[in-house]
Image (cartoon, coloured by chain):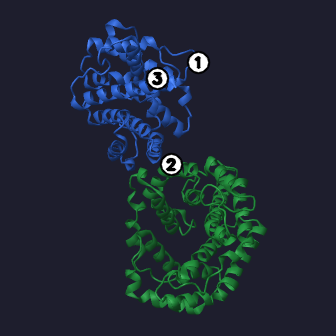
Chain colours: A blue, B green
């Protein structure tokens, strides 16, 4: 019971954090996304760090996409989360990559206080992956879908725009709005997406159907900013 | 690519079941007029159409071809009483297109009933026929049937091709069951039931090549075997069929040992006639998908060697 209680607390913290990222992205105003209220006690602080780790590099998305410098305490919490949760030796590729994305983001946003660039994890598991798996994994790693950022995962996506588009359709059909939103975010970055996909309306549809989930709203907001080129 | 034998065996089993359950195709001459005498004609027309495909493709084994011929003879002589039931249906509902639609594949296979032909010719002259309200895909199908019968289609197919859902290549994520059936039938009509794959306009073929794999994946996982079977037919109508291995293996695994294909998930329970009414269609579709995919698979092998 305690475990599920902790897990639902963490889910709540992740949702709250995602909501504040969405607000910052929508308002264009730099909000304190990664550092909510100063944690009152150790347990709450641990929860806040865990939530940042779950959201990964997207915790700093307003700074990344809106090109506004992060606030010092926001950066400090983000750095603490990167350091608190190093991936284990047998971590899944998505875990390795999401941690890499955090370290890379830290280095990009605060080059004076972080080492880097860091060598990329292996991306061979995406090579030859069926389009269903490819899209699922890309959606999990949607934090890597950042304009102008090159990495092996992004290249794997760039090579297979039709497959990612298929995965988007599959996710929408299954009402897996998080996966659809993550795939949609990738698609805004890719060349060669079939015109018949109707991506713009598709993103609106995903938001309409699943946008009450802040994790969906975050991906759709990121996709829109990418689409409109606000980041440039 | 899927093992051709696996694809072929689905059709062998399906035809065995259809032959064993041929009495299920019977008509109900004394049915309540509110239900309509013509209700039970559709399965017979589908049976004839699919047997015609089987003869046309020429990939059936000798037993399979014999069963198909026996099924057709049974349907024509026994169920349709040598075509007289079609006449009776036409007299019951004079401007219904159903007797004509059921008759056409029999006519193409050499059966004949002059009175149905006279009714078809008369109906063809009626403005009421040209104005008959139907979905764009069904309308296209009626015109295609008129052409095959030897009549100038009203309206011409060229006026109808761009009116369907598929022709407009809409957002693929909006497809649900009803739309998917419209798509499959649209392809049947454009290709004359798989006979002319080049009947698909290039934009339609490209659209299907891109999105059909998603729909196949989806309805496979939903275990909607009837619709999956029709989608596998569409695949076999494309310029470059995928003959998707996972889909065919799932489809074959859903088939019952005696050859019946459940419509949805598993076999229904109930009285034999009720079970027949539920599973005859997916079983016919299984035979249809099997024969077309087998034919395409062998053609691909021939090209490769």
- Indicate which disc, 1 or 3, sits on the residue closer to the N terminus: 3
How busy is the neighbourhood of tag 1: few (under 14 within 10 Å), some, or many (20 plus)? few
Q: Quadrant of residue B51?
A: bottom right
| Chain holding disc 2 | B
Marks 1 and 3 share the same chain: yes
Q: Check whether the beta carbons of the residues at disc 1 and disc 3 lie within 8 A of each other.
A: no
Residue at left offset 40%, top offset 22%: A51
Residue at left offset 48%, top offset 13%: A86
Q: CA distance from mark 2 to mark 1?
A: 33 Å
**Residue A40 appears at what percent x and percent y?**
33, 13
Q: Is residue A123 visible?
A: yes
How busy is the neighbourhood of tag 2: few (under 14 within 10 Å), some, or many (20 plus)? many
Residue A90: numbered disc: 1
**Residue A12 appears at what percent x and percent y?**
39, 27
The residue that label 2 is drawn on is B214
Residue A6: numbered disc: 3
Q: Is residue B72 left or right of residue B220?
A: right
Residue at left offset 56%, top offset 35%: A129
């Amino acid at each position: 019971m305690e475990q599920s209680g902790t897990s639902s607390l963490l889910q709540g913290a992740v949702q709250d954090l995602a909501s504040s990222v969405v607000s910052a992205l929508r308002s264009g105003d730099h909000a304190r996304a990664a550092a909510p209220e100063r944690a009152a006690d150790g347990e709450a602080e641990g929860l806040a760090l865990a939530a940042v780790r779950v959201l990964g590099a997207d915790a700093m998305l307003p700074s990344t996409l809106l090109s506004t410098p992060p606030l010092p305490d926001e950066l400090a919490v983000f750095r603490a989360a990167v350091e608190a949760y190093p991936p284990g030796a047998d971590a899944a590729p998505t875990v390795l990559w999401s941690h890499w994305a955090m370290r890379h983001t830290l280095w990009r946003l605060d080059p004076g206080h972080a080492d880097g660039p860091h060598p990329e994890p292996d991306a061979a598991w995406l090579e030859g992956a069926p389009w269903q798996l490819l899209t699922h994994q890309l959606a999990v790693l949607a934090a890597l879908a950042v304009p102008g950022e090159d990495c092996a995962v992004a290249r794997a996506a760039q090579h297979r725009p039709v497959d990612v588009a298929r995965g988007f359709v599959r996710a929408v059909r299954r009402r897996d709005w998080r996966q659809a939103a993550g795939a949609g975010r990738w698609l805004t970055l890719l060349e060669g997406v079939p015109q018949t996909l109707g991506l713009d309306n598709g993103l609106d549809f995903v938001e309409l159907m699943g946008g009450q989930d802040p994790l969906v709203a975050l991906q759709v907001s990121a996709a829109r900013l990418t689409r409109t080129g606000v980041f440039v | 690519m899927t093992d051709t034998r696996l694809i072929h065996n689905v059709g062998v089993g399906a035809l065995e079941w259809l032959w064993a359950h041929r009495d299920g195709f019977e008509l109900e001459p004394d049915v309540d007029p509110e239900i309509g005498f013509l209700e039970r004609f559709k399965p017979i027309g589908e049976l004839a159409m699919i047997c015609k495909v089987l003869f046309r493709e020429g990939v059936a084994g000798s037993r399979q071809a014999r069963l198909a011929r026996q099924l057709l003879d049974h349907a024509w002589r026994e169920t349709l009483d040598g075509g007289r039931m079609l006449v009776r249906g036409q007299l019951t509902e004079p401007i219904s297109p159903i007797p004509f639609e059921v008759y056409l594949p029999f006519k193409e296979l050499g059966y004949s009933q002059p009175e149905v032909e006279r009714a078809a010719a008369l109906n063809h002259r009626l403005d009421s026929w040209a104005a008959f309200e139907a979905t764009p895909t069904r309308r296209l199908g009626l015109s295609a049937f008129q052409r095959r019968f030897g009549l100038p289609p009203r309206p011409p197919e060229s006026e109808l091709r761009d009116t369907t859902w598929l022709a407009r290549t809409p957002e693929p994520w909006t497809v649900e069951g009803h739309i998917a059936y419209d798509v499959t039938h649209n392809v049947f009509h454009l290709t004359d039931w798989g006979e002319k794959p080049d009947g698909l306009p290039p934009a339609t073929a490209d659209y299907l090549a891109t999105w059909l794999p998603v729909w196949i994946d989806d309805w496979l996982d939903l275990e909607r075997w009837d619709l999956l079977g029709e989608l596998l037919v569409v695949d076999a109508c494309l310029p470059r069929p995928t003959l998707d291995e996972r889909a065919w293996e799932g489809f074959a695994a859903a088939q019952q040992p005696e050859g019946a294909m459940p419509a949805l998930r598993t076999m229904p329970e109930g009285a034999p006639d009720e079970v027949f009414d539920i599973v005859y269609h997916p079983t016919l579709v299984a035979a249809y998908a099997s024969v077309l995919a087998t034919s395409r698979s062998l053609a691909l092998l021939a090209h490769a060697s």
